[in-house]
Amino acid sequence: MTRLKDCRQYTWEEFDALPLDKSNELLQGEYKERDGIYHTLNAEQFDRQTLDRIYVLTNIIRSISKTKNGATFLMNRLRHKRAMLYFAQASTRTYLSFKTAADILGIRCTDVRDTSTSSEIKGESFSDTIRTFSSYFDFIVMRHKEESYAEQAAWALNCSDRPVPVLNAGSGKDQHPTQALLDIYTLRRSFEKNGGIEGKTILMAGDLNRGRTARSLSKLLALFPGIKIIFSAPHGFGMRDDVLSYLRDHGVEYSVSDTFLEHVSDADAIYMTRVQDEHDQSDGTSSKRSYEEFSLKEEHLKLLKKDCAIMHPLPRRDELDPNIDKDPRAKYWRQERNGMWTRAALLAITGDIEGQIQEYWRDLSRQASHTGIIQVEKDDKNWKPMERTLTLDHHLS
């Protein structure tokens, strides 16, 4: 059996050169054998079965949290745990989403959001900083401008005597696995009455070369049969070859285009992204391109399918007209809320309380089957219980 400590046989340079499937196996260690999730680092580590587990657990947590007693039950699951939110790169949604997800499960959080306030400014190595966090915390959620820093953190901790789970909240231009998980959840909810994600056409538009959300989502979409992806981006800003190669290896049909509007009528979902100009060099690369053509405006809505899902990882700029917000096909604000629930499910699996939550839900479902009382959700008309399982009136919990 592979164990976390097996990482010790490699230097970081040797480990970083390993094939991804091998490094993922080493990083997950014995937890992979138990169908658990230890570190969350990249989209490639997930299979379809795990996505299904996260989807089901996300729905269960949403259901349980609707009642006072249910919310109290969830909050007591991980009250004894602490999390470090190490955000060395700017964030609003991902930071708040992880913070509130942790709150749902009772995890106490501390954050570092400016590396100038940490000992790294004094010359401390990245590995020593991460090992210091592990002395005080049970989870490390980290966002960094450098690619592979989450993997390096996980490797360093696996090599230590106190490994703790690392959750990648965004790494440079490379990966954003938890955003991809919530995007998949949003797509599944959007298409649950329309055959699911399978066989759908997804149009991704914008700065795809430097947009980590589209990269991670593309790799998760490869787990759904019949998917077709259209990559629409200005010349020089298209999806990178490593993702295209991954899709070819997994039999995913895709096309690449430097136009946008001609494809919107074919799309079952449109995934808009902003210009990633924080990655610009001093030459001002982004300012030299025109993005006007790669914008979705209110007047374009008539071109879209009636059940198209319009998504955006946010924040947005001019590429997505605010007047679209009122259209029922606009899913991005719901997408944002889904992030909290999906990350709560991920933390629950990582914290090994999935079974406790499932058992609590089964008990509630048995009570509902005896009483026949169905709760009408008044605060969210679009919310639906998982797989038609009864949700409970408040007095039953």
Image: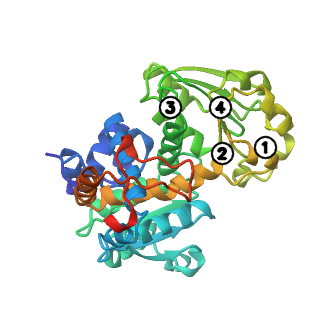
Disc on res. 266: none
Disc 4 element: loop
Residue 386 image point, x, y percent: 39, 45
Which residue type does callout 1 highlight? Glu
Mark 2 closeness class: few <14, some 14–19, many ≥20 residues within 10 Å: many
Secondary structure beneath disc 3? loop
Identify the secondary structure beneath mark 2.
loop
Position of 1 with respect to 277 (left or right) is left
Mark 4 vs mark 2: give the one in front.
4
Who is closer to the viewer here, 60 or 32?
60
Real-space CA distance between mark 3 and mark 2, rounded to the nearest whole angstrom: 21 Å
Q: Are marks 1 and 2 in contact (CB under 8 Å)?
A: yes
From the image, tell me which residue sits under label 4: 308
- Image disc number at residue 312: 2
Residue underneath mark 1: 319
Q: What quarter of the picture does the C terminus occupy? A: bottom left
Q: Tell me which numbered mark, 4 or 1, is placed earlier along the sequence.
A: 4
Query: Which residue type does callout 2 highlight?
Result: His
Q: Earlier in the sequence, mark 3 or mark 2?
A: 3
x, y percent for residue 336: 59, 54
Q: Amino acid at mark 4?
A: Cys
How many C-alpha atoms fall within 10 Å of the one at disc 4: few (<14), some, or many (≥20)?
many
Marks 1/3: CA distance? Answer: 29 Å
Residue occupied by mark 3: 193
Quadrant containing the N terminus in the rendered view: top left
Q: Residues within 10 Å of mark 1 (few under 14, many from 20)?
A: many
Q: Nearer the viewer, mark 3 or mark 2?
A: 3
